[in-house]
Image (tube, helix red, strand yellow):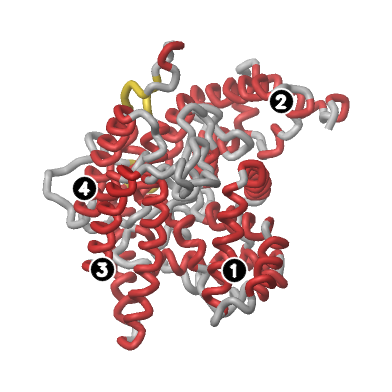
Amino acid sequence: MTQEHIPLAKMEKILRLADGDLTDKLADSNYEADDLSFLPSFYNDTAQCDLKLQVIKRALEKKDIALLCTLGRTKRGFVNNEVRQRSWSTILNSQLLLPSGTTTTGCTKHCDEKQIVLDIKRSFGYIESATQRETLQNTLQDTIVAFFRKYPSMRYYQGYHDIVSVFVLVFCKYSTRKTTVNKISGVRKKTLNRCVEVFSLVYLRDFLMDSLDFPIDQTLIIPLLIKDKNPDLFKRLQLDKQKPLFAIASLLTIFSHDIKPDISIQNSLIFQIFDMVICTHSMYTPLILYSNIVLDLRDKLNQEYSDNIDNFDNEVDLVHAVVQKVLTKTLCDEKQSSKLWDTALAQTRANFSLDPRLEKKVCTFINKASPLRTTANGKPQLEINDINSVNKLINKGIALNNKKKDKVPKDNNDKDWNYDKLIKTSLLVGAASLTLGACHQNGYLLPGTMSSSHIDLGKIVSSVSLVTDSLKHIINSA
């Protein structure tokens, strides 16, 4: 779109915003996500970011949550982590009212702290500086332990540390001196802990149970989304006959298991994904994003399926292998990966709501206490949630989870155990690859990871020890 084709009303609106003239009338107007879509036609990238930052800061000053959420879910999200810290804190505090004070209560150890410590040791493996990595790991452990000691009925799962890692990086303090660019000088712990607490309670309750039943239920939404847009791909991948467990790791970690941020880039992809989840106030957003990724890869998936149909004894293994191979291969290629994420994010930003028809179907198999039906369903809040109402939802969710487990026939126990262990082990293998340094700084897998030039025997020995300990925990927790 050229400048002469820009609607005059849009031009006047954005210029008023850029000048800081955020009047009450403007704040009350219907400010749609595409109101910023014309900017690339006549602003360079730096000018776009500067302009958007002015608007975001003005929205923060006015505490205009609606406008702030609109800006956060558009292209580039909140642009940098300094603004992102204020924005996330403002929005999350508007989604759940917590009592003032610290997030910790007492010092009784949580039953999952052993596994938490094991996962912390594998975190931030892509950070080159040992000092910075230790600072981040210590902060990560303190934050996670504080949450679970305050909410002992919640259960830790492998992958939760990936999500909290994103918050830790966002709330870091970075040195501004030219000689120490991007050196982490500390973390804003109080705000970090509060935001992690709110995000966990509002968005992640289904995952914080003692089984994976609720997360697996959520993955069933992905086939509905794919079928709605591409029935042929839905049939080809046999999504009417099997659970899409290939998506579970991405869902449980909101893609933070798949994408590791480059700390030299203040607006890394994973930060923008979290911007969008928080600003849509919806746990449907990761599901829609994942389905868009699968749909964008439909041609490659169809081809891979055809090439391998004779190599597998059953369709479940075939489909799982095909999806994992195509995703991994695409994400290993920096150009293909960048294009894929840009396209999928743009599609999700343009349509992040669940169709009412599909929502009706979802309500038949998603538990009544789920964030998808209560605190993170993407609908405008009639009133702010408070900790008492959320505690009731936690207890209700635990009761429903126990009831669901009790309904599982005894002869299915081995099958359920395999599902649970498959998912946990898949997360573990990914974590081990990061420990081995298998990720490029930008978050892409190095193509020659296991070549002799990339192998670090010291890291391998350390990783094998960590993996062994984790596998023992997985087996013993059965």
Q: Residue at x 39, y 38 (%)?
A: 167
| Type of amino acid under label 3 | Ile
- Does label 2 or label 1 sit earlier along the sequence? 2
| Residue 382 x %, y % | 48, 49
Of tags 1 and 4, the one toward the viewer is 1
| Residue hosting label 1 | 223
* SS label for mark 4: helix
Q: Would you place residue 184 above or below residue 443 in this image?
A: above
| Type of amino acid under label 1 | Pro
**Residue 252, quarter of picture:** bottom left
Of tags 4 and 2, the one toward the viewer is 4
Of tags 3 and 1, the one toward the viewer is 3
Q: Looking at the rendered structure, which numbered label has been put on residue 475?
A: 3
| Type of amino acid under label 2 | Lys
Task: Estimate the spatial distance between the alpha carbons at disc 4 and disc 3, rounded to whole Å.
Answer: 27 Å
Left or right: 100 as drawn, with respect to 125: left
Tags 4 and 3 touching, CB below 8 Å: no
| Residue hosting label 2 | 13
Foreground residue among 124 and 369: 124
Of tags 2 and 1, the one toward the viewer is 1
- Does label 4 or label 3 sit earlier along the sequence? 4
| Residue 337 x %, y % | 62, 46
- Does label 1 or label 4 sit earlier along the sequence? 4
Q: Would you place residue 324 above or below residue 118 in this image?
A: below
| Residue 119 x %, y % | 29, 49
| Residue hosting label 4 | 150
Task: Estimate the spatial distance between the alpha carbons at disc 4 and disc 2, rounded to whole Å.
Answer: 46 Å
| Type of amino acid under label 4 | Lys
* SS label for mark 1: helix
Task: Please indicate, yes or no, whether residue 451 appears anywhere in the rendered image.
Answer: yes
Task: Estimate the spatial distance between the alpha carbons at disc 3 and disc 1, rounded to whole Å.
Answer: 30 Å
- Residue count near mark 3 (Cα–Cα under 10 Å), binned few <14, some 14–19, many ≥20: few
